[in-house]
Image: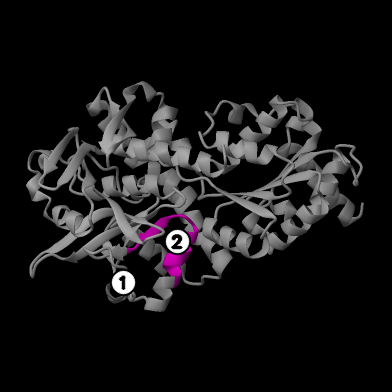
């Protein structure tokens, strides 16, 4: 038997394994038993619509459920009457597919299904982990242009790099969809604790806005700390075994694969030790202010290399850089300082150890968890403010929302894991300085357990438990994504 014939038979065998619905009419029970992520309700209508001749690019970090969401989308297609032989799934990182053209793989799948190569039937073709195909964007664009009866859906873990190539080569051909790490709202939903939350209204700038309270703040806080330690990845939520040793799952299956495999392959990094050490430092100090000058002195890594490494870690969706403004919300032309946050606080737990409510580091992790609810929100420009308040003191406001049109601050949030400031709001010197200077008359201050509103001279402070605030932001972020796609 010739080599090419043998390889073809092996590929067809693999295709049958990866597409069990061809024979059984359903995705594997393993995936069917998993609770779908709430983002599926937004993603599915986008891939079901064949009238828009665009490939859908599902982006997100490792292990946040992209493959599971593809399988859940496939099951919904089957449930809605799409023929099991008109759905093709290909995991691009499968070794046997290496250097095999995507079009050839599709044709082999059609051949296996007894479909003619030039079939005009409607098909859905899923490419999982497409970033492992060299010049994937060129291949995918060609397929979109050639096969108008096929909806192409691709996923990948290097979000920023995928988006860059999608924007450059797929203009008018690709639509991007970002799947973030598990949000706190989704965590509460997956754990079945939705009854803990109830909708309420607060007066905000002369109108009522939606937010959420809780019937049991102690239970919600315990769940919030669980989320900080274990909540970013769906698999960890449902596995007590993984929670006993999150480092084994997150560090080895996520961090190491990204740092030691994905990034070196994508960017040709030779010395991964420096990259690994840098990420460990950033993870331990998530939420701290950094500068390239100080980082270079402390790590021994040149500033230009540090800039590249940080951009690579952002591309892998492990970290996010948040930029600085001063007390007048003026942008710095030459940025020397910035904050870096983990996109998912449980990454720190995996590298070090679970954090407790009373640990000194809880404040930074609470802040990281709140920012993680904001990061997936499109169209929102958030900064932090930092300036010299006096000769001895620095002023700082944790989150400043900027009006994108006027480039002026429109809201502010101070993140605290303490009830102290609800009783002594005068101690919030930086916030009380920042607000009148920027014509902000209302702000949110988070607490550990207290919800109340306090009027202070010309400003109003709305105090709410930080777990309720995180839940509200993440639920609103999901709604914002739904509206962005016209749903």
Q: Which residue is mark 1?
A: 332
Q: Position of residue 258 (x, y in %)?
A: 50, 56
Instruction: Give the residue drawn at x 40%, y 69%.
Output: 274
Instruction: Give the residue drawn at x 45%, y 60%.
Output: 314
Q: Secondary structure at mark 2?
A: helix
Instruction: Give the residue drawn at x 38%, y 24%.
Output: 194
Whether 312 is among the magenta residues is yes
Mark with earlier residue (1, 2): 2
Q: Which mark is residue 313?
A: 2
Give the Cα separation between the discs numbered 1 and 2. 23 Å
Say if 297 sits above or below 450 in the image.
below
Q: Is residue 19 visible?
A: yes
Span of residues in magenta: 308-323
Q: Secondary structure at mark 1?
A: loop
Say if 187 sits above or below 91 in the image.
above
Residues 230 and 160: in front is 160
Q: Residues within 10 Å of mark 2 (few under 14, many from 20)?
A: many
Q: Position of residue 84 (x, y in %)?
A: 77, 31
Whether 325 is among the magenta residues is no
């Amino acid at each position: 038997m010739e080599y090419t014939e043998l390889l073809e038979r092996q590929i067809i065998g693999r295709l049958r394994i990866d597409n069990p619905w061809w024979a059984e009419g359903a995705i594997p029970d393993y995936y069917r038993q998993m609770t779908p992520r709430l983002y599926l309700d937004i993603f599915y209508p986008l891939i079901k619509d064949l009238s828009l001749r665009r490939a859908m690019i599902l982006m997100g970090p490792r292990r946040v459920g992209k493959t599971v969401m593809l399988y859940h989308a496939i099951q919904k297609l089957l449930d809605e009457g799409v023929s099991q032989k008109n759905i093709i799934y290909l995991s691009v990182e499968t070794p046997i597919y290496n250097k095999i053209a995507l079009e050839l793989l599709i044709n082999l799948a059609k051949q296996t299904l007894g479909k003619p190569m030039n079939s005009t039937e409607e098909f859905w073709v899923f490419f999982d982990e497409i970033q492992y195909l060299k010049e994937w964007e060129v291949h995918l664009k060609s397929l979109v242009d050639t096969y108008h009866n096929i909806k192409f859906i691709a996923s990948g873990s290097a979000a920023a790099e995928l988006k860059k190539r999608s924007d450059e080569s797929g203009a008018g051909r690709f639509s991007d969809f970002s799947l973030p790490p598990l949000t706190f709202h989704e965590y509460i939903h997956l754990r079945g604790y939705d009854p803990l939350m109830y909708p309420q209204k607060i007066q905000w700038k002369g109108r009522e806005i939606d937010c959420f309270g809780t019937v049991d703040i102690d239970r919600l806080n315990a769940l919030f700390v669980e989320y900080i330690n274990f909540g970013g990845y769906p698999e960890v939520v449902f596995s007590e075994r993984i929670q006993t040793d999150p480092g084994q799952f997150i560090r080895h299956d996520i961090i190491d694969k990204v740092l030691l495999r994905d990034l070196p392959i994508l960017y040709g990094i030779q010395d991964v030790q420096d990259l690994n050490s840098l990420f460990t430092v950033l993870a331990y100090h998530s939420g701290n202010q950094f500068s390239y000058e100080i980082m270079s002195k402390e790590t021994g890594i040149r500033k230009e290399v540090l800039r590249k490494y940080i951009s690579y870690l952002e591309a892998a969706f492990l970290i996010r850089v948040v930029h600085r403004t001063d007390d007048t919300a003026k942008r710095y032309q030459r940025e020397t300082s910035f904050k870096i946050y983990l996109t998912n606080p449980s990454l720190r737990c995996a590298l070090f150890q679970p954090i407790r409510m009373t640990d000194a580091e809880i404040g930074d992790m609470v802040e990281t968890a709140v920012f993680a609810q904001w990061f997936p929100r499109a169209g929102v420009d958030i900064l932090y403010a930092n300036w010299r308040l006096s000769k001895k003191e620095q002023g700082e406001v944790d989150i400043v929302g900027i009006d994108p049109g006027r480039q002026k601050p429109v809201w502010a949030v101070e993140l605290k894991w303490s009830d102290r400031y609800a009783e002594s709001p005068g101690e919030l010197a930086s916030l009380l300085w920042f607000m009148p200077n920027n014509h902000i008359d209302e702000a949110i201050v988070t607490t550990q357990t207290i919800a109340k509103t306090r009027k202070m001279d010309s400003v109003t402070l709305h105090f709410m438990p930080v777990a309720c605030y995180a839940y509200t932001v993440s639920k609103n972020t999901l709604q914002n994504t739904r509206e962005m796609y016209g749903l």
